[in-house]
Amino acid sequence: MFASELDGLYDFTEKAYEANKVFRFEGTPFMETAHKAGRRESIAGHMWSAALYWLNLKSLCPALAGAVNSERVYEVLLTHDLPEISQGDISMFQQLAGNGVDKKAEERRNLKELSESLPRETQDAWLDNFDLFEAEDITRVTDLTILVAKMIDTIQGSFYALTFGDHPEDHAHTHNRIINKHLGGTVRQLIKELEKNGHPAAADEVRRVMQHYITLWQQKGVDLQLDPF
């Protein structure tokens, strides 16, 4: 049985290597210069960067780290975009344009197929995480670990765009739309659930993280107009 499970692990690992060859931000105008220069972020690079962000953030935010299952945060961050191996990344810019209508259903099928060689409990846990992570209504998500992972996912992705994208001030309207849609609601729900579950210090840490993040964008000439959190 153990040897069979190891065979399954290597089968999965072989498939997961493909995450290095699938790139993000396709069809995103403000990333064109970076792409032409050969700078592209793979989905593997994104997931690794998000996990690295949490590795450091949890030390800066001890109350937040104590309020969530840190190991599971890593698990979610290191698996959340694996389904894109099969169909590619549909960027947030493309989603604003109405693309990716069937994205979630297709990605769930991809994740189930990708993880079929792993133990059933692992596959079930990943699918449960996926369903919560990709929930249509963020206000119905109460899982603190999922909410932290979603916050980090969007911070990492948008910070990459801020760092390597073309003239962020010229695309301020688009950046505001993307960050409001994918980060603002998540942060408000996270703060609400932290306070509801008796973690006011963790909620204050999240507020400080977000206030600092807004300042980073302001320094690049973008005034993020996020709804109050």
Image: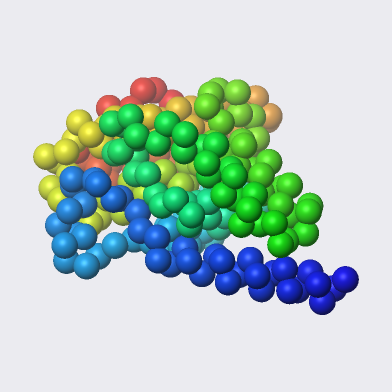
Q: Quadrant of the C terminus?
A: top left
- The residue at the point 62 percent across, 37 percent down is 131
Residue 35: image location, x then y, percent: 21, 60
Residue 194: image location, x then y, percent: 61, 32
Mark yes or no: residue 7 visible: yes
Q: Seen in the image, is 219 located left or right of residue 187?
A: left
Q: Nearer the viewer, residue 95 or 199?
A: 95
- The residue at the point 56 percent across, 31 percent down is 135
Residue 27: image location, x then y, percent: 25, 46
Q: Does 112 appear above or below 141?
A: below
Q: Nearer the viewer, residue 78 or 127?
A: 127
Q: Seen in the image, is 148 located left or right of residue 42?
A: right
Q: Nearer the viewer, residue 174 or 203?
A: 174
Question: In the image as oriented, which residue stretches furthest toward the right?
Answer: 1
- The residue at the point 79 percent across, 52 percent down is 121
- The residue at the point 46 percent across, 47 percent down is 153
Q: Nearer the viewer, residue 164 or 88?
A: 88
Q: Does 140 appear above or below 133?
A: above
Q: Quadrant of the N terminus?
A: bottom right
Mark yes or no: residue 211 visible: no
